Amino acid sequence: MRYDLNLMPVFLALMEERNVTRAAERLGITQPALSNALNRLRDTLRDPLFIRERYGMRPTQLAEEMAPVIRTALAQFDELILGQQEFDPEKASRLFTVAPNSYVEFVLMPEVVARLRERADGIKLRLIPFGSDLSETGAVSGTTEMVLGRITDPPDNMVVQHLMDDGLACVVRADHPEIGDSISKEDYERLKHVNVLPPGRLRAGLFQALEQRGLRREVAVSVTHFLAVPEMIAATDYCTTLPRQICRRLARDTRLKILPAPADLGTFPVEIAWHVRYRHDPAHRWLRSLISEVAREIGGEADA
């Protein structure tokens, strides 16, 4: 029997997403194209593979049994083929699907894109969101090339590398009537706060750090992205606690004032993870090296 290897990533995306729309978005193809690929798989394997239900698609027993076999086979095939290829960044043409969390997207990715423009203009990036669930990004199956952020409990088929560490600082409006060049514990607890609730582990990390230092906050408003914070802080007497690298960028806004936190709130790691199938992929290794270079330089700025 002949098998079309191009259909295997479609199968794995459907296994993880259990939804045609999300699987198509992850793969960067249209829903009709994905449905057509699924029909070809069904015809080849003589099994429905996925049964439509009210809230998604349920894999059949054959699909459940096939999934780990296909993941392993694709990883071994990629490792063999990609490891033999030469890579010239100036001549390369490739699209990488990368899943950064909101912190990495704001802090690291602009400089990564700038260096790609200078060194490898044919390398394109497609960014998809990463919260805390690796499987939702497609990284566990390898359909997403790498994940950037706080990596917790990775499966055995994922490689994790530390990139940098960051700490936390406070932001108030520049002409705040009660806060001068520093913020005390009493000030911090008296003020109302803007709280950032990005998906993932940073949220829990800040809450834990505050609890460990005996600091309380009265949260007036919670937002879902760092970019929502400056306007709210500039228009109120509220305070916010953000990663230092975010604060370094907000310091360009003359309406805002960056201050050390009233206590040492510790640091959090920034990491990169990828499927073992990309371990020897020359283009993937080159991009990982570029991202590591940017992270080292940005992390070094914080220590300077």
Image (tube, rainbow, N blue to C red):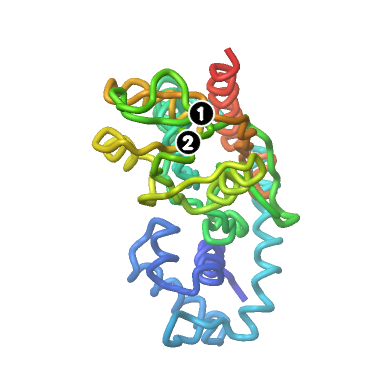
Residue occupied by mark 1: 184
Q: From the image, which quarter does the N terminus lie in?
A: bottom right
How many C-alpha atoms fall within 10 Å of the one at disc 2: few (<14), some, or many (≥20)? many
Query: Residue 153 placed where, x, y %?
Result: 70, 55
Query: Residue 8's quadrant in the figure?
Result: bottom right
* Residue occupying the point 54% across, 58% down: 138
> Residue 259 versus residue 65: which sits nearer the camera?
259
Name the outermost residue toward the top.
Answer: 304
Q: Label 1 crowding class (10 Å Cα cut-off): few <14, some 14-19, many 20+?
A: few
Drawn side of residue 281 relative to residue 176, left or right: right
Q: Which residue is mark 2?
A: 188
Quadrant in which the C terminus appears: top right
Judge whether residue 90 can be spotted in this image.
no
Residue farthest along the left direction in this orientation: 235
Pick whichever, 204 or 278, lies toward us: 204
Q: Residue furthest right?
A: 156
Please tell me whether residue 202 is drawn above or below residue 251 in the rendered image: below
Q: Callout 2: helix, strand or loop? A: helix
Where residue 216 sits: x, y (%)?
Answer: 53, 45
Q: Which residue is located at x 69 percent, y 78 percent?
A: 65
Q: Position of residue 54 (x, y in %)?
A: 42, 87
207, above or below 88, in the image: below
Q: Residue at x 31, y 28 (%)?
A: 173
Answer yes or no: do the residues labelled 1 and 2 have beta carbons within 8 Å?
yes
Residue 109: image quadrant is top left
Say which amino acid is labelled 2: Tyr
Name the spot of residue 19 as percent of width and height, x first: 44, 73
Name which residue type carries label 1: Ser
